[in-house]
Image (spheres, rainbow, N blue to C red):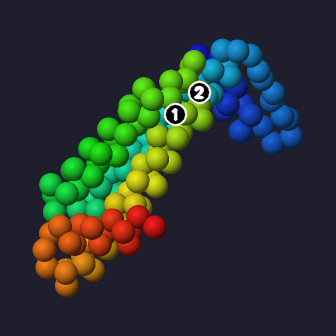
Amino acid sequence: EVYPALATASKETKYVEVFYSGDGINKYEVSLAMQTDIMWALGSILFVTLYMGVYVCSMPAMFGSFFVIFASVPLAYVCTPAAKTTFASLMSLFLITVIDVDIIFIFYDFWAQSVHLGKVDRRLAWMLVKAGK
């Protein structure tokens, strides 16, 4: 209730700076920043999903890739449990997503380049060797 008035006052005053602090205000600011960042991240994930669908031209491959990406997050949390979840660990989710999507594009490109090998097992082995470097 007080925060909007303080934020408005600090923006509207030209020659006066309004300073405020406190545990409640700091938690509220962090929560507000997280909500905004999460909305941007969800928008970017939606955009990348649509782009991947157009690029890969396969809905099962697109959904399977995102299943693998998001299944890796809880698996990593179980394998390396933390005492508490921090802001950095929350932001790492979006970093992991971006890196994994990039890797998916690389593997898809090498799969497309392996078409000259014919058999699926030879293509898969070639793709893993070349893209896995």
Q: Are marks 1 and 2 in contact (CB under 8 Å)?
A: yes
Of helix, strand and loop, which one carries label 1? helix
Which residue is depicted at the point 67% across and 31% down? 7
Q: Is residue 125 visible?
A: yes
Instruction: Please state the horizontal and vertical placement of residue 72, each as a whole percent of the image.
Output: 37, 40
Amino acid bearing label 1: Leu
* Image coordinates for residue 79, horizontal then vertical, percent: 45, 29
- Label 2 residue SS: loop
In the rendered view, tell whether residue 72 sits above or below residue 26: below
Q: Mark 1 — residue?
A: 90
Specify whether 130 is left or right of 10: left
Tell me residue 58's x, y (percent).
16, 63
Q: Which mark is residue 30?
A: none
Which residue was labeled with disc 2?
A: 86
Identified at 66% across, 32% down, the residue is: 8
Q: Position of residue 73 (x, y in %)?
A: 40, 37
Q: Quadrant of residue 20?
A: top right
Callout 1 crowding tier (Cα within 10 Å): few <14, some 14–19, many ≥20: few
